[in-house]
Amino acid sequence: QVQLVESGGGMVQPGGSLRLSCAASGRTFGSYVMAWFRQAPEKEREFVAGIRWSGGSTYYSDSVKGRFTISRGNVRNTVYLQMNSLKLADTAVYYCAATSMEYSSRVESDFDYWGQGTQVTVSS
């Protein structure tokens, strides 16, 4: 079993920045993908960004490309989401997810493990 724990959420003004962290523990796999999804009130959960642990390649949704950066930490099984130029529309609960599938999935059902979520609120 894999446990994911997110941290770093909070409230920020439009144009501001936040960095989210996700730490994985328990049984981890050699090659996998970690990703961030988000769910705004009354909306479905959507893909935000992903990283393939082997090789470090990253991929993003169009709505955050150029503003958000996903990266691996120096500590194994830690991933970050640096969010810059935040907009009101970025307000959501952000979830960390992981899968042992070795391709750059954006599909929620492909991910087996999920964190509890962390709230990000962008408000003036």
Image: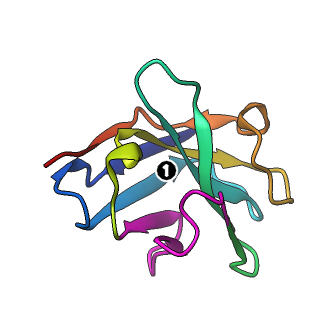
Residue 82 vertical position relative to residue 24 in the rendered view, above or below: below
Q: Seen in the image, is 73 located left or right of residue 14?
A: right
Quarter holding residue 44: top right
Q: Residue furthest top?
A: 42
Question: Residue visible at 61% across and 38% down?
Answer: 46
Tell me where residue 83 appears, x and y as whole percent.
38, 66
**Res 74 seen here:** yes
16 or 51, nearer to the observer:
16
Residue under label 1, please give it: 25
Q: Residue 2 placed where, x, y %?
A: 58, 41
Residue 14 x %, y %: 23, 58
Magenta stretch, residue numbers = 60-84
Inspect the image, locate mark 1, and give the three-letter code of the amino acid beneath it.
Answer: Ser
Q: Secondary structure at mark 1?
A: strand
Query: Does 94 lie within the magenta span?
Result: no
68 is higher (above) or lower (below) than 97: below
Toward the left, the furthest residue is: 124
Colour theme: rainbow
Q: What is the crowding at mark 1: few (fewer than 14 residues within 10 Å), some, or many (at least 20)?
A: few
Left or right side of 82 for 61? right
Residue 1 appears in the picture as rendered:
no
Front in this rendered view, residue 83 or 25: 83
Quadrant housing the N terminus: top right
Q: Would you identify the image quadrant in which residue 59 lies?
A: bottom right
**Per the image, is 65 magenta?**
yes
Q: Residue at x 53, y 64 (%)?
A: 77
Q: Is residue 20 left or right of residue 124?
A: right
Counting labels gives 1
